Image: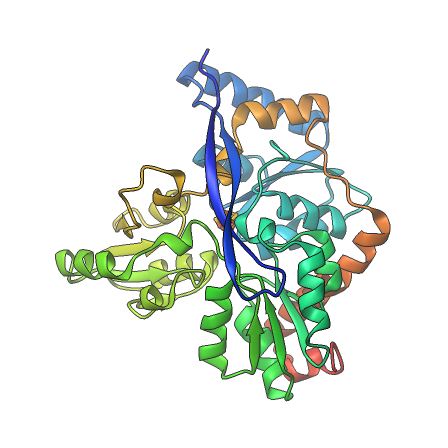
Amino acid sequence: MATASVIDVDYEQPAAQGSVCDTRHAWARVPPEPSPVERIALKERIRRLLRERNAVMVSHFYVHPDLQDLAEETGGIVSDSLEMARFGRDHAATTLVVSGVRFMGETAKILSPEKRVLMPDLDANCSLDLGCPVDEFSAFCDQHPDRTVVVYANTSAAVKARADWLVTSSCALDVVSALHAQGRKILWGPDRHLGDYIQRQTGADMVSWNGACIVHDEFKALELDLLMKEHPSAKVLVHPESPADVIALADAVGSTSAILNAARGMDAKEFIVATDTGMLHKLRTLNPGKTFIEAPTAGNGGTCKSCAHCPWMAMNGLVELANALETGAGEIHVDPALGLRARVPIDRMLAFTAGLKNGQPAGSLIAGIGAA
Ligand code: SF4
């Protein structure tokens, strides 16, 4: 029987003042691939357990294709973290099985405290979450009491509870634009590249925490430029957690959902994609006549950092998911009082995006919230 491989993961953690990063280590335990026969049996077991436990799967675009396909096939969803949160909150199932990383399970629990939330592996983390400890982040906020605190979804419940607004990459530009239009100054955290991109797009007055995603931080503009010369007709799709010089080469910049829409909407036959390679499964399934090429990373390091696949997303496997459903292992718990506080900025984000969809003006959706 093959065993899980444990890999070391470097990530940057800001110093107390939030200005200088030093590198820390974490780890990820990537499960072995089941054999074809084991996969069939595991999927059947999961389908049965989902029915028996009144459970629904909520999977992120970056997890293993098996967990994406099974979610859709059984009435669940594959999506970005914004839609995962909304779907889990609104679904009638009493158990949510969240395949992704820990903050996604916590968000689901905060929004649905009455539901049981299970994850295949509770140790699946995120360098943005790890690199933004609440005490240091809170001290950073305390240094800027005149700023509206906007945090990315990839944070702990405690950091969310400290924020005025939560955003995902799907709605971050809209929220910061609306705040900027009302003259607010922003404290942003934790992804420095996304914060920098939003600042350049909106012109908002922003100070940023200094975190990064270990996957997107690795894309390299020089190598991307060379690849673009090999594929001159390819369109370049980039996630805004990538460095600015990579974003500068993009034909479309956006969240995972925006990347999907761009690939569907553009006439091109070839695309170079700078986001986690887990995304390629959905891109290829939805666009059979088109070719998707991975954008280059550092490439020579031989560590998980150079493969453009999140080692924590890779911890989600069929075996772990079946065990969670069978035994209740991997249940997410969030302190109820903390959950209530963390829910405030999440609800604001969900109300804001729902209002925008219904044609309400952005300014009316943020009035008075987080004002200094
Ligand atoms: S891909 Fe990056 S942002 Fe997403 S969970 Fe992994 S480390 Fe975090």
In this rendered view, identify the residue nearer to me: 257 or 133: 133
Rendering colour mode: rainbow
The reply to whether residue 351 is in sight is no
Q: Is residue 131 left or right of residue 268?
A: right
In this rendered view, identify the residue nearer to me: 240 or 267: 240
**Image quadrant for the C terminus?**
bottom right
Q: How many labels were placed on the picture? A: 0
**At x 37% / y 68%, what residue is drawn?**
244
Q: Is residue 135 left or right of residue 9?
A: right
Image height of 356 relative to 91, above or below:
below
**At x 68% / y 31%, what residue is drawn?**
330
Image height of 62 relative to 230, above or below:
above
**At x 71% / y 21%, what residue is drawn?**
327
Q: Quadrant of residue 153?
A: bottom right
**At x 31% / y 41%, what residue is drawn?**
301
Q: Quadrant of residue 176?
A: bottom right
The percent position of residue 152, horizontal first and vertical second, equals 59, 61
The percent position of residue 65, horizontal first and vertical second, equals 44, 36
